Amino acid sequence: MFTRSIMVAFISSVVISTGAIAGEVIKFKSQHYNVVTKWESSELGDEPGHIRGAFELKGIGVRLAGPSEPPYKVDCWGVGDYWKDGTGSDRGYCKFTFTDGSYFYGEWSVSKVANGHDVGTATYYGGSGRFKGLKGGEKFDATLMGDRSPTAVEGTIELP
């Protein structure tokens, strides 16, 4: 009886500490608080106001719905075409790093930037630790505010 209690306590602590179970599908909502840390641009000259830009941003993600998760680190890199009327398109990559050292990547794209929003999708890939071999993706809506970009995220992570 005592051995069984120890085993149950051990298994419970492993599940709680990793937050992940093999074969689990995690549906979540998060808010990312991002800041642009690098921005390089040049006007192409092919039409008035056409700018090609490359950027990096860093931030934190906070889980709002789904399994509990401590805040995690967000690092993103992207490129895009933008016009002086505030429209454009962009694409890039993000790395999401969690407090236990596990991480995964996302490849994202936005076909139309407009009205101060970057609305798009991402596909998750790669991964280490509890996210090794994951599949999944997200839909996001980034509000563009100068060098700030708060982003609402709704996604799914499928664990192997």
Image: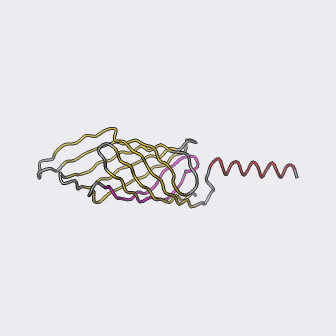
Is residue 121 covered in magenta?
yes
Displayed quadrant of residue 60: top left
Q: How is the image coloured?
A: secondary structure
Q: How many marks?
A: 0
Q: Is residue 97 above or below residue 154?
A: above
Q: Position of residue 138 (x, y in %)?
A: 44, 58
Is residue 144 covered in magenta?
no
Give the overall secondary structure of the magenta segment.
strand
Q: Position of residue 81 (x, y in %)?
A: 23, 52
Residue at the (37%, 57%) spot, across then down:
141
Side of 92 where 128 appears, left or right: right
Q: Position of residue 88 (x, y in %)?
A: 24, 55
The furthest residue to the right: 1
Residue at the (27%, 59%) spot, across then down:
112
Q: Which residues are magenta?
A: 117-139
Side of 159 where 86 appears, left or right: left
Q: Position of residue 51 (x, y in %)?
A: 19, 48
Side of 62 where 111 appears, left or right: left
Residue at the (15%, 47%) spot, across then down:
44
Q: The C terminus is located in which quarter? A: bottom right
The furthest residue to the top: 37
Residue at the (82%, 51%) spot, across then down:
5
